[in-house]
Image (cartoon, helix red, strand yellow):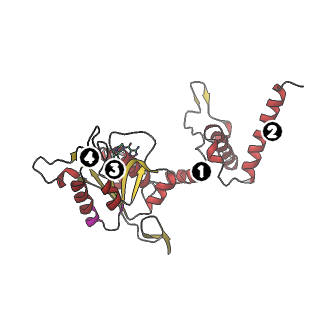
Amino acid sequence: MIWTKRSCDWIFLRDWKIERMNFTVLTLFPEMFASLMVGGIIKRSVENKRISIQTIDIRDFASNRHRTVDDRPYGGGCGMVMKPEPLAGAIRHAKGRHPEAFTLLLTPQGRLFDQAVARELAGCRGLILICGRYEGVDERIRQDLVDEELSVGDYVLTGGELAAMVVIDAVSRLLPGVLGNEASAQEESFSTGLLEYPQYTRPSSFEGGQVPDTLLSGDHGAIRNWRREASLIRTFVKRPDLLLDLPLTSQDMRVLEKLQQELQAIIEKHSTPF
Ligand code: 4GX
């Protein structure tokens, strides 16, 4: 048994017991999360009890008779701000039910969510996801009741709900037992840090496009090499930034050097002689 420190909690790694991951979502629109149960891997994982998704309606924690959850910002300006009392009530309720959970606020100001963050969060015992609407939430909520702010990308959504669903989806597929074996191998290939190699299925000829011969050859060594090379070249063309801090094998280096030589030859051929 190995103990690992994560951003949120002490957890078991490679232990026999697989615990169910709980996602508690705080939102003004709980119905939006019903879409996760329409089909696919997330629905199946909930049914197989690998994950649970609970929604808490922030409005249920409003105190006045109109169930008000927003108010005008101090100092003026356009738009509304989410009042602190209903949010604090909802967060404390969620923490009471899941004391070991890690509490996230979805906001463009947060740490950028990527595969590494997804892996980190998959180590948590539970996640409480706070979905803001309007111009945001009262600052005192972040300070006192939120463990981390998270952003799913540099663009502005109308609410945190879609961002929370992105996090739930990407984290869930990393949990033990959520994906079948075929697909967990794919995570391995992402964890190499390279982009996916091209995939083909039958027919071998489609509208003039042929499946590369190597993939039809049945030579598993050749197929492995072809895929690694295709991943490398694709990553070089589409996301060269990813190649900068990656562990590359000597065979990878040979592929890149061959590419370099071919580019060099082309450049020399076309450069005007002095
Ligand atoms: N990645 N938004 C949240 C309202 C808001 C603002 C501040 C709390 C604090 C987003 C993103 C995102 C828009 C969701 C503003 N709530 N969330 N909302 N990008 O754009 O996560």
**In the rendered structure, which segment of residues is drawn in magenta?**
94-102
Q: Are marks 2 and 4 in contact (CB under 8 Å)?
A: no
**Residue 98 among magenta residues:** yes
Left or right of 221: which side holds 140? left
Q: Taking 154 as reference, is 139 above or below it?
A: below
Left or right of 266: which side holds 194? left
Look at discs 2 and 4 and give the one toward the viewer. Answer: 4
Amino acid type assigned to the residue bearing label 2 in the image: Gln
* Disc 2: which residue: 261
* Disc 4: which residue: 74
Residue 47 in view here:
no
* Disc 3: which residue: 43
Task: Locate the C terminus by quadrant.
Answer: top right
Neighbourhood count class around disc 3 (C-alpha, 10 Å): few under 14, some 14–19, many 20 upward? some
Q: Residue furthest right?
A: 274
* Disc 1: which residue: 193
Instruction: Of the two numbered discs 3 and 1 on the same chain, state the one appearing first in sequence.
Output: 3
